[in-house]
Image (tube, rainbow, N blue to C red):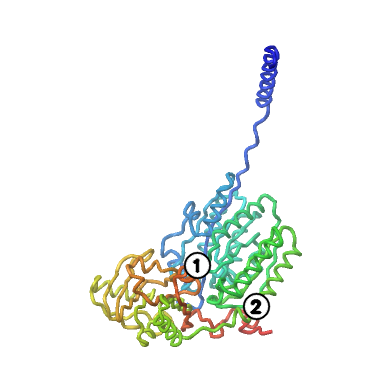
Amino acid sequence: MPSSSFRVGARIVLATVAASLLLACATQPPPAAQKIYRIGVATISHETCTFCPNPTGVAEWEFYGPPIRGEAVLEDGPYIQGFVKAAKEYPNVELVGALSPREAKGGSSGSWITQEAFDKYVNGIADDLKANMPLDGVYLALHGAMAVTGVPKPEAEIARRVRAAVGNIPIVATFDLHANEDHEFLDVADGAFIVKRYPHYDSALQGDRAMRYLLRVIKGDYKPTKATRKPGVITPSVFQGTGVSPAMEIMERARIWEERAPDTFVSVAFGFAYADVPDVGATVEVMTNDNQKLADQIAQDMSDFIWMKREAFAGKKLPKVKEGVAEAIAAAKAGRTPVVVADHADRTGNSTWILEELIRQGGKNYVVATIADDKAIEAIKAKAKVGDAVSVDVGGYADEYANKPVKIDGTLEYLDKWQQHATVAVIRFGDNNRVILTPVLEQVMDPGILDDLKIDRAQVDMIVIKSRVHFWRGFVENGLAKAVVVIDAPGLGPADLSTIPYKNAPVADLYPLGKKM
């Protein structure tokens, strides 16, 4: 046991040390304030079907309301939400939502974007970013398949106008895998992140990756060296689902490169074949940290791999209408229900080919979800209420491939708002059949529409939808559909791309349209 004098002495020493530390702290300057990194965020996104009949102008862009700013931008869509979620992990990051247009009416059923609309919104984004300077970086949530009258490569032009507004600060973007791009975007911007899944499970993940990458570039921890390649392969959207090969293998190879070579980012866009633009077709984009040789090596390897897989990727065949409907009815009779029947080529949602053939072949217990027909909805609203007998012509007029109107005699089961649509109608007819009418194209991705509209799924043998691949998430990968029939009906998004009258696309350089070797 220490003596009392030792304990007293120890206390005096401790008190002296503590007083010295307090004095030292009091005389030290306070730590420098943590730098705040301000990042501008904006979105303008459109997948333009240039063969559709209706141009996309200001009225279509503002169908759901005027452009948004501020917090509304930071809540818009999964890409931005992923970016914002990652940014919240950094207390010294401040996000600024710049002017951004909402989704345009009709989505990818909209044709050429007018230059008036493009200038209005892109210049608005650039001006708003400039007004919020100083900024340390910019994030753009784009789609990549935009087609604008008089602007050959819109996303590259967006990057150029933003660059002119904000100066020499980093710019990164996220893209859908249907993007039509070439080197011009990355010539101006500092990074591009493209989803690797179709259906797009990883949209938020790419937003997350874009944010972390952008912050590293801002801080000087990452010096982007970039490489872009065009393999010379064009594929219809219906063949691009990443749940099956070769699309699965292509994206897996991109992931393998990212794992083998740390600090690399490897993106592949399969392209959007229904936009008649100069940069249509597949694209590979790679970023490395100050290693141009590696970027070029990876980009060339990915391009060569896509070319090697071209026949399996672009040369598939699908059943036509009569054959496909017969196959669906046979599957239903065999008890493989529900059968999902996908009309992948109808970009306006107004086509009646499959509905007409189902009636001709005596189909029963089916739902057509949906036919886009605002005229039929208005006609029903003018003369009927739920429970009334109705006789109405539906669909068949929106474009040259829409077939012809089909007369439906039945009972009105639903007439009310659904999701963003002011009025949706459901008509029951024939042998427990239904057709759902929406005012514009509705690409049904899951069976929730049936639940919302009080349609008993247990009584449905076939669900006919207007969708390419997105429906796999809500119908196939969860085991719901017991059979799937994808039909190559006439439409503005055909599987056989040789039927498309391209004018601007480099057809001679694209397999399978021209380049065969």
Relative to 330, say whether 465 is above or below. above
Task: Decide: is 330 above or below 30.
Answer: below
Apparent side of residue 223 relative to residue 390 in the rendered image (left or right): right
For residue 339, the mark is: none
The reply to whether residue 501 is in sight is: no
Write down the quadrant of residue 23 in the picture. top right
Give the percent coordinates (x, y) of residue 280: 60, 75
Q: Quadrant of the N terminus?
A: top right
Q: What label sits on residue 309 in the rendered view?
A: 2
Viewer-proximal residue, 267 or 229? 267
Q: Label 2 neighbourhood size at 10 Å, few (<14), some (14-19), many (20+)?
A: some
Q: Are marks 1 and 2 in contact (CB under 8 Å)?
A: no
Q: Nearer the viewer, residue 330 or 244?
A: 330
Rendered position, 425 above or below 495 = above
Residue occupying the point 53% across, 64% down: 201
Q: Amino acid at mark 1?
A: Glu
Residue ID for mark 1: 116
Q: Please tell me in which quadrant of the rendered image residue 242 appears.
A: bottom right
Residue at the far top: name it.
5
Q: Earlier in the sequence, mark 1 or mark 2?
A: 1
Local secondary structure at mark 1: helix
* The residue positioned farthest toward the front in the image shown: 1
The amino acid marked with disc number 2 is Lys
Classify 10 Å Cα crowding around label 1: few (below 14), some (14-19), many (20 and above). Answer: few
**Which quadrant holds residue 32?**
top right
Residue 402 rendering spot, x and y as whole percentages: 42, 82
Which sits in the foreground, 480 or 466? Answer: 480
